[in-house]
């Protein structure tokens, strides 16, 4: 794969930038911009090849089925799943976690059992487990990171008990941008007889992920954070586990036989995809994956690490600024979350908005993490390979004047 791509040509692949040349978009962790080819792939399907997959025996329906299943195979290949049937299409990562918390927990969780949840988790990978624990009479134990966001294997080892059924943590924090060693954590969970669930929403768009090498039991992620449209998510699960799990929802497309008094469910993956599927979304995700493969992760990671380090170093140099998580710019992977002494994050965001700079302020759907860190909220700038050094310079220039704008004497 070429390490050299023309950033101007890359930005032309994202019409958002052409349409909004005045804007600096630094909120890609919330949602990425859309790759033109992904939206066009969905549009092309709906306008010229539209038929319901998995239903008809006529050519157009068969083609729709083939396009949908080709997207599943691309997704499986992208994260190195062993079988295409280990890829379940959902609406988003939140639905993937809810499916797991319902279906997996009904299989493995009983009264008095325990689920270990990382304190860094997005609410999507926290609340479904809390709901499941309440339903089955189990408990949730929080695994705490240190002040820079790091989890140690020793701290997990200390929490694991014979009745720990599930351990879950993100592969990359949406607040710290820190990559967690989930391969080690999955091994420790398995040695304890526990299952391991990884949140890949922030990692899959930014780094190569090999689920077989990591040996995670499940991984959830969303298309909208990786250049595809809203409304398509992924649940990866090991086939032997998915086979045993009961369906999450009932309806069309996920049954083999229904009589008045019995039902036989379909095989994987259709058992978990009730109703008419989001074919356009899956096809768009497949096109986004093709684009990732054409750029190559060597290029993507090299560019993103260079831009992130530059942004982090500049922010660390500003007086009265502090960066959450590691103080090493190389540990931030596209995300720099910061605080300005005496200025509320909402004020920071509002002032930057007047300068046409889009960043995120609040708790980033990670309330318990902020409580653990002793702060109410924070400001997050997040980038992707399509951002530029000039955009970061605009951010830093605007940030450097914020305390003055709020009436502080520098």
Image: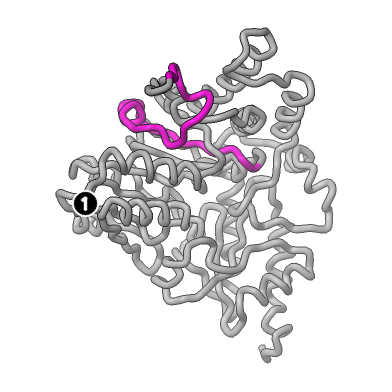
Q: Quadrant of residue 41?
A: top right
Residue 2 visible in this rendered orientation of the protein: no
- Give the residues drawn in magenta, as a range: 230-259
In the rendered image, the vertical position of residue 130 relative to residue 60, given as above or below: below
Q: Nearer the viewer, residue 73 or 270?
A: 270
Residue 217 position, x and y percent, is: 34, 36
In the image: residue 102, left or right of residue 84: left
* Number of numbered labels in the structure image: 1
Q: Which residue position is annotated with label 1?
A: 111
Q: Is residue 18 above or below residue 150?
A: above
Tell me if residue 106 comes above or below residue 172 in the rendering.
above
Question: In this orientation, which residue lies closer to the viewer: 54 or 204?
Answer: 54
Name the one closer to the observer, 54 or 191.
54
Decide if residue 178 is on the left or right side of residue 340.
Answer: left
Badge 1 crowding class, 10 Å Cα cut-off, few under 14, some 14 to 19, many 20 or more, is few
Q: Position of residue 36 (x, y in %)?
A: 75, 36
Question: Nearest the camera: 24 or 368?
Answer: 368
- Which residue is situated farthest in the top direction here? 58
On the rendered image, what quadrant is the N terminus found in?
top right
Residue sitting at 19 percent across and 41 percent down?
193
Q: Residue at x 53, y 67 (%)?
A: 363
Q: Position of residue 255 (x, y in %)?
A: 46, 22
Please tell me which residue is depicted at 61% across the width and 33% down the height of the picture: 292
């Amino acid at each position: 794969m070429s390490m050299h791509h023309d950033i101007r040509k890359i930005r032309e692949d994202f019409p958002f930038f052409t349409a909004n040349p005045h804007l600096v978009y630094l909120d890609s962790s919330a949602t990425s911009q859309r790759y033109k080819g992904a939206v066009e792939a969905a549009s092309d399907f709906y306008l010229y090849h539209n038929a319901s997959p998995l239903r008809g025996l006529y050519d157009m329906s068969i083609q729709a089925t083939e396009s949908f299943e080709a997207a599943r195979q691309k997704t499986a290949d992208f994260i190195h799943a062993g079988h295409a049937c280990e890829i379940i299409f959902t609406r988003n990562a939140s639905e993937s976690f809810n499916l797991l918390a319902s279906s997996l927990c009904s299989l493995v969780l009983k009264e008095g059992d325990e689920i270990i949840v990382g304190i860094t988790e997005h609410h999507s990978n926290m609340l479904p487990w809390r709901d499941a624990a309440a339903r089955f009479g189990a408990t949730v134990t929080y695994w705490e990171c240190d002040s820079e966001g790091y989890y140690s294997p020793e701290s997990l080892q200390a929490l694991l008990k014979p009745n720990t059924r599930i351990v879950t943590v993100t592969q990359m924090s949406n607040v710290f941008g820190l990559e967690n060693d989930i391969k080690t954590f999955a091994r420790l969970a398995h040695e304890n007889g526990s299952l391991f669930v990884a949140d890949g929403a922030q990692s899959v768009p930014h780094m190569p992920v090999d689920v077989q090498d990591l040996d995670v039991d499940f991984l959830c992620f969303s298309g909208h954070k990786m250049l595809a449209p809203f409304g398509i998510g992924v649940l990866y699960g090991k086939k032997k586990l998915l086979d045993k799990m009961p369906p999450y929802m009932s309806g069309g497309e996920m049954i083999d036989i229904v009589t008045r008094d019995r039902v036989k469910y379909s095989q994987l993956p259709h058992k978990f995809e009730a109703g008419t599927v989001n074919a356009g979304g899956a096809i768009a995700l497949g096109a986004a994956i093709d684009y990732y493969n054409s750029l190559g992760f060597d290029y993507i990671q090299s560019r993103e690490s260079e831009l992130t380090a530059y942004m982090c170093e500049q922010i660390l140099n500003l007086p009265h600024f502090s960066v959450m998580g590691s103080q090493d710019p190389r540990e931030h992977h596209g995300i720099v979350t910061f605080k300005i002494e005496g200025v509320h994050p909402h004020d920071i965001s509002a002032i930057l908005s007047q300068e046409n700079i889009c960043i995120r302020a609040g708790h980033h759907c990670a309330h318990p993490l902020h409580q653990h860190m002793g702060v109410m909220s924070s400001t997050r700038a997040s980038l992707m390979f399509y951002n530029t050094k000039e955009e970061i310079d605009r951010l830093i220039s605007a940030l450097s004047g914020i305390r003055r704008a709020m009436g502080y004497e520098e």
